[in-house]
Amino acid sequence: VPTGRGRVIAYVAAVTMSAVGLLAWAIPRVDPVLAAIACGAVLVSEAFASRFRDDVDVSLTNVVMLVAIMVGGPEVAIVAAVGSLPMFLVRVHHMRAIRVPFNVSQFAIAAAITGFVFVGLTNVLGAEFVGWTYLVAVGAASVVYSLANHALVAAAVSLSTSERFLAAFRSVGTSIALQAPYVGIAVLAVVIIETASPWALLFMAVPTLVARYGLLAFQKLDEAYDRLVRSFVKAIEIKDLYTRGHSERVAQLSVLVAEELGVPYEERRLTRYAALLHDVGKIGVPGCILNKPGPLTDDEFEEIKKHPTIGADILYDIDFLTPAIDIVRYHHERLDGRGYPYGISEEHLSEIVRIVTAVDAFDAMTSTRSYRRALPVEDAIAELRRCAGRQFDPRMVEALAAVVERVGWEPTIEFASEERLHGHTIPVGTFQERVASEARTDTAEVPR
Amino acid sequence: VTARSGAFVRATVAVLGVGLGLVWWTSAFGDDATLGLVELALFVLAAAITELLPMRQPGGRVVPTSIAVIGAAAVLGLTPSVVAGVAALGWLIAWLVSRPETLDVREVAMRAIGGWALAGVAAVGAELLPYRWVGDAPFGLVAAELQVGAAMAVSLAIVIGLPTLDALTRQEGRWRFVLRRIVESISVTWLVGVAVASTTVLGALVHPVLGEWTLPTMLIPLFAARVGLDRFASASKAYEQTIRAMSRLPEQLGTVAADHGVRVGEMARDVGLELGLDAATLADLERAAYLHELGRIKLEPDAPVTRREFATAGAAVIHETASLDRVARIVEAHGVPELQADDDVGLPARIVAACCEVDRYAPDLAVEGQRHEVTVRLVREIGDLEVVGALTRVLGWADES
């Protein structure tokens, strides 16, 4: 039985050999000029691929393949796949060399399957350009291309990792949803090529390039936004010597837990920013309270309780954060309604609020604070489990436990240098000891 | 004066549109280009759908994508009254779907006049450049016939005419820098304009073959452009709103009055406009004005702090964002007069400092005598008569002086 690596190599070799066979069949049958144009179009579309979101790239290669099939048949589309080779060679330093022949070959095989399905369907339906049966055939071909492409990649992923084939195949849904515009663009392109001139494709290319410009600009601005928020959070955390990096860690861990629970992409993105900013209201709490060694007085704790409301007020005008502003407002609330500042109960706490609440407490326990040293990860998880059902959502606690085990999360101990503590020493004592020493049982479980 | 000038421009456009429409009415163009009732209904439907999906380039105005549908109708040779009807009906259907509280009759009228004007522009283009582009049809398809002059004229009207008109109606009495504002208006809408104009020509090009399928297919690339620009615009909006939100951080320390940053930001923008600053400098000026007190969050709130100290501390925070370098330099220079010699940041820094000073004395400004005193103080401390003059004009004190 071949090993994991052996199976991958055997699979890639089989895919590559199949593609070589298809090319040997197609090359003698194509018009060289048409094939060269199709290769060039694939090269350009791959070079101009852009990121729609973190987990979805968009390129017009699907459209080029469909147009090649409609204009010149499956053989032109098979040869067009070779056009992607230079782009994969350019990117070879970002990937393993074995991916180059695989990627080019899977394009050729997907194009062949799609082409034969399209030809078969147009014959069966007696489809004429441009009737509705023809559009049905193009639509079906587009879906087949996407399925074939994803199946070939998913098989490679499941052979090279422990991920199951169907799990690796899951992103196909998003891809099929994108096929409708591809079909429209492909039909439009064929009409232009057949009735006007290939130069008239420029009229179609302009909006497409504008789309690409928008996506690239978005990507760049999104990165700038990330830096902007992080630098502000960093500036705010200067005030609290002990929580430096806390927001960053809560954001990072919250997104991982959200992924573990299958939270959709857009919500995960919002969760990240809201978690990053969840303690922004601490700017309104005097530094002497935040950095106080030992227990707080009731008045001091009342001041601390204000920070979720202050934070939500500061962020109120940021429209895109509106769906996640509750993370900031309610991240110290409890399922049993005994949290602060509002004392609301579980029906008002959304899934993402519950995630951040659990992660915030976990990071607070596994970090050194002014009143105690960091707890080991296992102890913190045990504490969360003890409070699950009353303070934290058990589902979030278990997802968090799974994530910290998977990523090997370590407690944060050395983040505030001794010289910046202004002569204060971190009191010896664990979180449990602090809980035991405080009579305030209602709020003792809530790390500040 | 402002409302009058806006109304004057609108009236001029209306007259021009009607005039151009009349030119076409009497010309031969368009006689053989009428559409069937079903297709006409599809045009109205497409105009309605696209009305609901406008496009915006960050920093620019919202552009209705329905212009692509109206433009295609104009290039295809529909009569001005029909194009005006399509535009107005499309808007009304969109209004019924989105159900705003009140019906804005001016908007309906503007759509109708706009449709009429585009059809008129197409007619004039066809008269001036009376060529038809006939493509080859190797597979027995109907050859595309395109009125070259009409297509070019409509494209120019969309890419240059509309943003120019927009800039003229938004001058608010500031006619000194009108040319700059027109150029800026074009520069922040040209991408959308070119995408819309290309779609217009594309629609006319494929119509002989696709017929009723023209609208659903021609709009797909435009909607793809909308998705891309929409993501860009939403990120841009979030970025600016976050800067504005962060201007509230120092207020939480109790050392800065509520909404001081926002007020200074808005005032600085008006002064920048008054002084004719370019769009990029205006944007950085506004951001710097919002964030000019940010440095206080790094300093002890109870200790006395000089402007120089919090300006330097604020610049250090802003520098860390790695994308607001100029904003950081303006913030620093507003508290460190030696740095104002740098032409790139000197003027914006003085504007921020002046606006901040005025807002600090806001409670006293209701008294005319106090306003004179503040003006004198500004002249002495800011030392830039141009900035102080612009600020007094923005605040409406210039007449008193």
Image (cartoon, coloured by chain):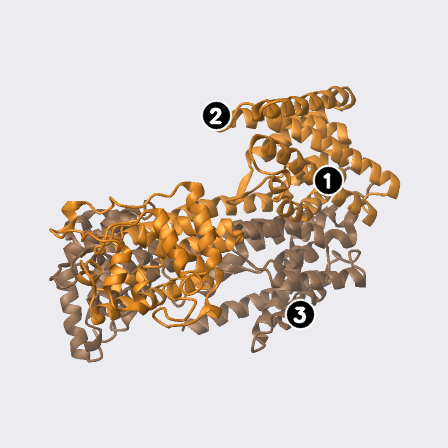
- Mark 3 lies on residue: B93
Nearer the N terminus, badge 1 or badge 2?
A: 2
Secondary structure type for disc 1: helix
Residue B287 sits in which quadrant? bottom left
Marks 2 and 3: which is nearer the front?
2
Point 78% across, 52% down: residue: B211
**Residue B295 visible, this angle:** yes
Point 27% across, 61% down: residue: A435
Q: Farthest residue toward the bottom?
A: B367
Q: Is residue A267 above or below residue B143?
A: below
Secondary structure type for disc 2: helix
Q: Amino acid at mark 3?
A: Ile
Q: Chain of mark 3?
A: B
Q: Amino acid at mark 1?
A: Val
Q: Is residue A139 above or below residue B364?
A: above
Residue A76 sits in which quadrant? top right
In whole angstroms, how far apart are the C-alphas of marks 2 and 3? 54 Å
Question: Is there a contact, CB below 8 Å, between mark 1 and mark 2?
Answer: no
Marks 3 and 1: which is nearer the front?
1
> How many labels sit on residues?
3
- Mark 1 lies on residue: A144
**Residue B279 visible, this angle:** no
Q: Residue B338, how many percent across, how many down?
A: 14, 49
- Mark 2 lies on residue: A93
* Chain that is orange in the image: A
Q: Amino acid at mark 2?
A: His
Q: Quadrant of the N terminus of chain B?
A: bottom left
Find chain B in the image and tell me its colour.
brown
- Badge 2: how crowded within 10 Å, few (<14), some, or many (20+)? few
